[in-house]
Amino acid sequence: MIKFIFRVFYITLVRFFVLTTLLTSLRYFDASPFPQEASVITLSYIFHALITFLFAKWVFAKRTSPTWTEAGIVTGLFVVVEIVFELSLWAVITGGSFIGALQNFTWQSFVIILIYILAVYTAAWQTRTSRARRANPSGMEM
């Protein structure tokens, strides 16, 4: 289990850098007729969901059948580490404090946390069902 937690932590670090790089580059993206802020927020939600799903699938790649407890551990580490890193990065960039950054949480931050939870549990469910389907192909009875 310790090896699994270290794997999750390592993948969380990589995921943080991918998300930070991708979402920072969204400032220069404007491909819709809607206001830039609306299209950037929408793309941000889509990228958060997609990247979290893909990295959760990477975490579960070594598991034979991920349990819901393991999905909870992955969700907890993704959420806690991501929040701590994002707030620390914001504090370093702006010169503010960590507590000040924590007080500036908006409803959009909570939506992103919900997206993390849904993406990880969807990845766990998809991994479980695909492994079960592979173990028992259709047409075979047990």
Image: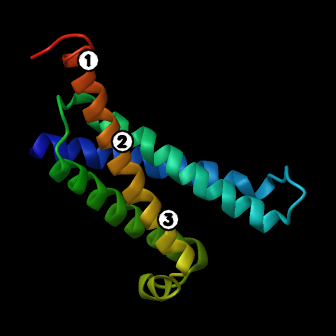
The quarter in which the C terminus is drawn is top left
How far, Cα to Cα, is label 1 from label 2?
16 Å
Image position of 37 (left or right of 47)? right
Q: CA distance from mark 3 to mark 2?
A: 16 Å
Q: Nearer the viewer, residue 68 or 82?
A: 68
User: Which of 7 and 122 lies nearest the eye of the viewer?
Assistant: 122
Q: Are marks 3 and 1 in contact (CB under 8 Å)?
A: no
> The disc labelled 1 sits on which kind of residue?
Arg
Badge 1 element:
helix
Q: Amino acid at mark 2?
A: Ala
Residue shown at 72%/54% (left/top)? 26
Q: Of label 1 and label 2, which has the lower sequence position?
A: 2
Specify the label residue 87 is tagged with.
none
**Which residue is denoted by mark 2 in the rendering?**
123
Residue 57's spot in the image, x, y percent?
36, 36
Q: Is residue 86 left or right of residue 123?
A: right
Cβ–Cβ below 8 Å for labels 3 and 2? no
> Where, by quadrant of the figure, is residue 63 drawn?
top left
The amino acid at mark 3 is: Ile
Question: Between 26 and 117, which is closer to the camera in this rendering?
Answer: 117
| SS assignment at label 3 | helix
Q: Around disc 3, counting alpha carbons within 10 Å, would you say few (fewer than 14), some (14 to 19), or many (20 or more)?
A: some
Circle on res. 112? 3
Circle on res. 134: 1
* Residue positioned most to the top: 139
- Examine the rendered structure and indicate whether residue 41 appears above or below residue 67: below
Query: Which of label 3 and label 2 is nearer to you?
Result: 2
Q: Residue at position x 43%, y 66% from top?
A: 113
Looking at the picture, how far across and down is residue 40, in whole percent? 72, 60
The residue located at (25%, 10%) in the rendering is 139
